Every structure is written in C-alpha cells, then in structure tokens.
Image (cartoon, grey):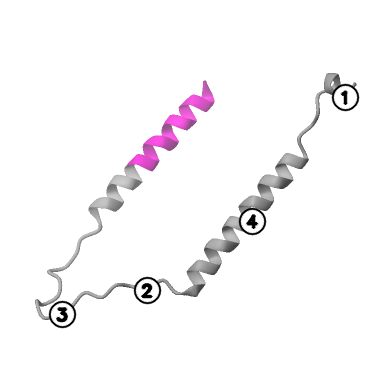
Amino acid sequence: MKRLILYSVHCAILFFIMTISQASHAQGPGFEDDVEDEAVPIDGGAGILAAAGIAYAIKRFKDAQKTKTIPADKLK
C-alpha cells in the first residue's frame, strides 16, 4: 500500500513538473521577415555518440543474456 501511495505521489509530481515546464516555454515576437531560417546540421559528434550508445546497449544486452540462469531440470 505504501508503494502505491509513493508511486501515485511521484506520478503527480512528474505530471505537475511537465505541465509547468510546458507553460514556461514562452517565446518572444521572433525575427524580422528578412531573416532566413537555416537548418541546424548534425555534426559527426552526435553520430559518434549515437553509435557508442547503440554499441553499449548491445553489449549490455549480450552480457545480460550470458548471465541468465539455466533451470535445474534443463541441465539433465
């Protein structure tokens, strides 16, 4: 019961923080009409970080598969 109450409180706090953060994203009037929008390039650093994250996730998955225990009835 205590876990349920704690979970509910955490969910309520998370919901409150998410709604407040959405309201706080006020923007100014913007740029003049003569300013062109330019696309933001994703450089090699973001690609390297993404590849490293995927490699780390695969390693963790394989390590977790190795440490699974085999039931005693399957050993015979």
Pointer 4: what residue? 56
32 in relation to 8, above or below: below
The Cα–Cα distance between marks 2 and 4, rounded to whole angstroms, is: 25 Å
Q: Position of residue 37 (x, y in %)?
A: 21, 74
- Left or right: 57, with 15 as reference point: right
The Cα–Cα distance between marks 3 and 2, rounded to whole angstroms, is: 18 Å
Q: Earlier in the sequence, mark 1 or mark 2?
A: 2
Q: Is residue 8 magenta?
A: yes
The Cα–Cα distance between marks 3 and 4, rounded to whole angstroms, is: 42 Å
Q: Earlier in the sequence, mark 2 or mark 4?
A: 2
Pointer 1: what residue? 75
Q: Quadrant of residue 52?
A: bottom right
Which residues lie in the magenta part? 1-15
Q: Nearer the viewer, residue 28 or 61?
A: 61
Q: Nearer the viewer, mark 3 or mark 1?
A: 1
Pointer 2: what residue? 41
| Label 1 environment density (alpha carbons within 10 Å; few <14, some 14–19, many ≥20) | few
Q: Position of residue 27 (x, y in %)?
A: 19, 64
Taking the spot 77% from the left edge, 41% from the top edge, the residue there is: 66
The Cα–Cα distance between marks 1 and 2, rounded to whole angstroms, is: 55 Å
The Cα–Cα distance between marks 3 and 1, rounded to whole angstroms, is: 71 Å
Q: Earlier in the sequence, mark 1 or mark 4?
A: 4
Q: Disc 2, disc 4: CB below 8 Å?
A: no
| Label 3 environment density (alpha carbons within 10 Å; few <14, some 14–19, many ≥20) | few
Disc number placed over residue 35 in the picture, else none: 3
Taking the spot 46% from the left edge, 27% from the top edge, the residue there is: 5
Report the label total. 4
User: Tag 1: residue type?
Assistant: Leu
- Left or right: 68, with 26 as reference point: right
The C terminus lies in quadrant: top right
